[in-house]
Image: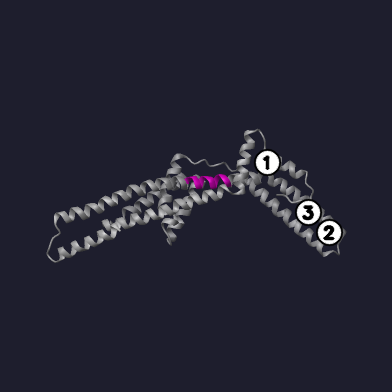
Amino acid sequence: MFLSNFIKKYQNSRKRRDGGIQPTGKELAAVEPAEEREAKEKEVQLARMETELEQRELDLMNLQIELRGFESLYLGKVGRYYAELYAIQARIAALLARQNPQDSTVQKQAEEAQAHAEETEREANENQAKMDKPEVIPSGDLKKLYRTLARKYHPDFNPGDAKAEAKFKEVLAAYEAGDEARLREMLRESEGDAESAPSEGIAAKLRRLLLKITQVEERIQKTINEITVLKKSSTYTLRERAKRAGQEGRDVFAERVEGWRGMRFGGSFQ
């Protein structure tokens, strides 16, 4: 509402000037400084909101990385037992198939059991390889670089901009890999783009700020929702259970394996 009223006043002042009548000093003092004050207030509001968003985005990113790491740890530790159990099942199914060569159902079950055992073995090897990789602990500088670049390239702030989306994926990949040099390089590139951008009038600046504030508000809520969903996931629940067990001197992974060892082969491994 304020913006539309200002634009009307500004247009009237232009008409007066175009008609040879200059706007009075009171008109200029009432209109132009008011819009400038509004822009400054919105800049302060936006900066405050962007700081909140940066932290929430970082919390989300770190939680995603932590859960992926825990999942790899979990699968790496218990996946080998999965592979061994399914290999035993496959051997039993193969034995039954040899004893019943005319039974197509038994033959099919043996083929499926063998395929499942091979797939589980492959996954166990992949997860073991992930466990062997050193964990990347993001430094303070790495986090700061990520926040700055994410604010510039995030798809929510650049709808329909394929170039910005591609840049954001690069930012994510560099952050997850702990590649601070690449993030610094991207920051230098982004600063060069900003310097070459054309200047804008005060009315255009206000419109941009209002749009940006709306986008940041939406992204903050979206990030909160994404974190809530992750904290309700089975992976998060198991990780918290493992943490509590560790504080009590217990090993959740070992307990699960012992439980599976007591199961019948026909059971379900969950």
Contact? badges 2 and 3 (CB < 8 Å): no
Q: Find residue 15 and report its image quarter.
A: bottom left
| Viewer-nearest residue: 11 or 56 | 11
| Viewer-nearest residue: 240 or 253 | 240
Residue annotated with mark 3:
90
At x 67%, y 35%, the residue is: 250
Type of the residue with mark 1: Phe
| Viewer-nearest residue: 106 or 37 | 37
* In the image, residue 252 above or below residue 195: above
Q: Can the viewer see residue 94 in this picture?
A: yes
Q: Find residue 253 and report its image quarter.
A: top right
Residue annotated with mark 1:
253
Q: Secondary structure at mark 2?
A: helix
Query: Could you tell which of marks 2 and 3 lies nearer the N-terminus?
Result: 3
Type of the residue with mark 2: Ala
Q: Which residues are magenta?
A: 58-67
